[in-house]
């Protein structure tokens, strides 16, 4: 699979999201993500605004569905999302309904393993239920509060190779990576490189970081130069 660069628009108003998206597209970004803060602040209007501006660009709606799976997926799809996110900690039936909605409505489903007791088994479970992608995710609060207490938190890289080996669908790793680490995730077999808070977005203020266009262009150039990333066959 050709590696993909996705920018997460973890912002809180549509005008800034559109401005940042324009900058990201100039830099060579492939996918736009309507981040959870933007969905909370602007609802599906953020998805609609990006779809109107970029009719042919994949758009991820990161609502982090936990219930009402089919209905929430339908709302996001009708707004123009091509990809929706369901949490692995949701009831199995919710995940099944989001996957069914994906099939019915022509959107792809990203299963997020944040806070699942075993991230590798969690990824395998989400893949077995029919998700199209795995998001290997270490949460923002978890990382930051542990750091404040002087405790360590896992890196998304810790289990990334094992997760890639466990599933035959594309994987992305998010949560606490540096830009250099994010760029290297295709080397682990994870072709979806996500740049968002705090890499492109100031996470404590939900504002676009200054000087990001040149940085994003460099990221896109390096990731796209990697070449095809083979998808693994799950280990027995």
Image: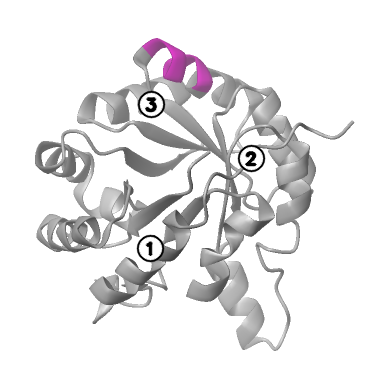
**Local SS, label 3:** helix
Which of these two is toward me, 167 or 103? Answer: 167
Residue 132, percent across and down? 54, 29
- Taking the image as drawn, is residue 208 in sight? no
Q: Is residue 150 magenta?
A: no
Which of these two is toward me, 138 or 59? Answer: 59
Residues rendered magenta in the picture = 99-104
Residue 208, percent across and down? 25, 72
Q: Which residue is mark 2?
A: 230
Which secondary structure dominates the residues rendered in magenta?
A: helix
Q: Could you say which quadrant of the image residue 184 lies in? A: bottom right
Which residue does the image show at 75% across and 31% down from the upper left?
A: 233
Look at the image and name its color scheme.
Answer: one colour
> In this image, 132 relative to 20: left or right?
right
Which residue does the image show at 13% across and 62% down from the upper left?
A: 19
Which of these two is toward me, 29 or 101? Answer: 29
Task: Report crowding for label 1: few under 14, some 14 to 19, many 20 or more residues within 10 A (C-alpha).
Answer: some
Residues at marks 1 and 2, CA–CA distance in whole angstroms: 19 Å
Task: Report crowding for label 2: few under 14, some 14 to 19, many 20 or more residues within 10 A (C-alpha).
Answer: some
> In this image, 77 relative to 148: left or right?
left
Q: Which residue is mark 3?
A: 73
In front: label 2 or label 3: 2
Which residue does the image show at 19% across and 59% down from the upper left?
A: 26
Q: Which residue is mark 1?
A: 221
**Local SS, label 2:** loop
Residues at marks 3 and 1, CA–CA distance in whole angstroms: 33 Å
Residue 20, percent across and down? 19, 63
């Amino acid at each position: 699979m050709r590696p993909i660069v996705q920018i997460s628009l973890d912002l809180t108003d549509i005008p800034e999201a559109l401005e940042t998206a324009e900058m990201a597209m100039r830099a060579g970004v492939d996918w736009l993500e309507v981040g959870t803060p933007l969905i909370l602040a602007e609802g599906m209007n953020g998805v609609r605004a990006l779809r109107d501006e970029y009719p042919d660009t994949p758009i991820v709606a990161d609502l982090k569905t936990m219930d009402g799976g089919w209905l929430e997926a339908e709302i996001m799809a009708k707004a123009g999302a091509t990809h929706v996110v369901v949490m692995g900690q949701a009831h199995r039936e919710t995940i099944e309904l989001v996957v069914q909605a994906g099939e019915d409505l022509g959107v792809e489903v990203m299963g997020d393993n944040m806070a699942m007791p075993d991230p590798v088994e969690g990824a395998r479970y989400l893949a077995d239920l029919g998700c199209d992608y795995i998001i290997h995710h270490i949460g923002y609060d978890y990382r930051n509060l542990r750091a404040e207490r002087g405790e360590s938190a896992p890196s998304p890289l810790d289990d990334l190779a094992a997760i890639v080996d466990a599933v035959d669908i594309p994987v992305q790793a998010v949560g606490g990576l540096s830009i250099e680490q994010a760029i290297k995730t295709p080397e682990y077999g994870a072709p979806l490189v996500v740049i968002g808070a705090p890499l492109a977005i100031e996470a404590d203020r939900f504002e676009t970081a200054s000087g990001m266009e040149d940085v994003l262009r460099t990221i896109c150039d390096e990731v796209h130069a990697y070449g095809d990333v083979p998808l693994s066959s799950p280990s027995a």
